[in-house]
Amino acid sequence: MNAVYLTPPIGPVRATIPLASSKSESNRALIIDALTDFRCDLHNLSTARDTQTMIRLLRSEDAVADVIDAGTTMRFLTAYFAVTGKHKTLTGTPRMCERPIGILVDALHLLGADIEYLQHEGYPPLVTKGFGYSGTNRVSIQGGVSSQYISALLMIAPMLPNGIVLELTGDIGSRPYIEMTLQQMAYFGVEAETDWTNKTITVPAKAYEPKSYRIESDWSGASYWYSVVALADEAEVELLGLKEKSLQGDSAIAHIMRPLGVESTFTDTGVRLTKIPAKESLAVDFTDCPDLAQTVAVCCAVKGTALTLTGIESLKIKETNRVAALQAELQKIGAVLVEAEANHRYEVRPMDIPASATGNARIHTYDDHRMAMAFAPVAMQRGLFIEEPNVVAKSYPSFWDDFARVAGVRLTTDS
Ligand SMILES: O=C(O)C1=C[C@@H](OP(=O)(O)O)[C@@H](O)[C@H](O)C1
Ligand SMILES: C=C(OP(=O)(O)O)C(=O)O
């Protein structure tokens, strides 16, 4: 099995990190570009596998579209192929075939899409077989399972003869991702009307305007550098290509990490992270930014900061069950993640054991890029192994090259 062995920095951490660009922004821009017959001019598209897969599948004539493990690619392409009447089989990794898609498929059926499941009702693989508009433009959709279903519908909505009136039911999770979708649609000339009180989004029937668009660096990827600075004894890190006013909800990491001792100063080129005094406990609601939960949980575990987490239910249906994965791996670095109230509140409780007793832990990554990257900053304090390090390719292929600027990174292989 491959692993990287990470060792603490020798002396203060000083680095400038290029970062990957946002796969979320990239994948939205690519769908919109496809809906303009590829007449947009997209700059700084992400090198993330999720984005490279989207690029390949949008251009491919093959009957089978294998999204690998990319959630946005699966959900966005299902809506795109369905509404453009393409005959495509959409599939992915075994885990992708356990990630639900029924809520999106039900909505597309209502609009007139012919979609059939190939194995289990409500899950990939599935086949899109054509589109005959049903005449309806009112669709009601659950808001609490994955915002990706909503983004997928919003982006194809202007292509429908009467647009769409989307009524969101129940709680809304990952709302900043819905707002990112709406802002990118507006940039390309389609303004939706949003009523968050009544939870309705109205999208007119209208052609997107082909335009030039530049994708920002990835704030989710930036979060690991915040954790590096929080955990290093001395550090100053500049992250390139980030903006204070971002479309990405994960820019919330700048506020979340302040009590963990990281100050953000925006510059002309990005953001500079420096150390400030930290607090002893923290409570964070991750409903709007689920991809930050692992970063913050691991950071608190190592710092000895008691953390209360809410809004992490959606973590159970991502690349792996991230709650279970964190529970198993945090123990190896001297902390526990416990459910304090059924299904609502969790706590990271650092255990009172010396760091030397948890040195050289072997962290299993469960085919989840964020498990690898969230645990890497532990190396600011002690050596550890991260198994199957190539998982980072999903969102941040150059992560280990960047990480080698701040810590020792050595690839190890054992049989
Ligand atoms: O729309 C997007 O780009 C994403 C939405 C979020 O998923 P959910 O809406 O399923 O929480 C997030 O976790 C994922 O990494 C990217
Ligand atoms: C959940 C993620 O991605 P997706 O749902 O697009 O696979 C992620 O990148 O953390």
Image (cartoon, grey):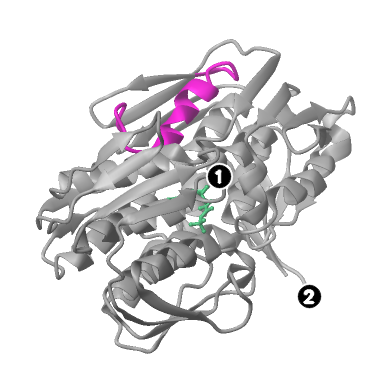
Q: Is residue 257 magenta?
A: yes
Quadrant of the drawing holding the C terminus: bottom right
Secondary structure found at label 2: loop
From where the camera sits, is residue 360 visible?
A: no
- The residue that label 2 is drawn on is 415
- Is residue 348 shown left or right of residue 9? right
| Residue 123 percent location from the top left of the image | 58, 71
Identify the residue shown where x is 62% and y is 32%.
Answer: 296
Which of 137 and 251 lies nearest the eye of the viewer?
Answer: 137
Q: Residue at x 32, y 42 (%)?
A: 201
Query: Which residue lies at the image location 17% right of the left edge and 50% below the top edge?
Result: 213
* Mark positioned earlier in the residue sequence (2 or 1): 1
- Stretch in magenta: 242-262
Question: The residue under label 2 is which amino acid type?
Answer: Ser
Q: Residues within 10 Å of mark 2 (few under 14, many from 20)?
A: few
Q: Percent x, y for residue 311?
A: 62, 35
Residue at the front extreme of this rendering:
135
Q: Which part of the image, by quadrant, shows the N terminus?
A: bottom right
The part of the image, by quadrant, that contains residue 389 is bottom right
Q: Nearer the viewer, mark 2 or mark 1?
A: 1
Residue 209 visible to an observer of this rendering: yes
Please tell me whether residue 73 is drawn above or below residue 146 in the rendered image. Answer: below
Q: Residue at x 55, y 26 (%)?
A: 12
Residue 144 numbered tag:
1
Disc 1 is placed on an element classified as loop
Residue 3 position in % (x across, y down) = 68, 61
Q: Is residue 350 magenta?
A: no
Q: Amino acid at mark 1?
A: Gly
Disc 2 from disc 1: Cα separation: 43 Å
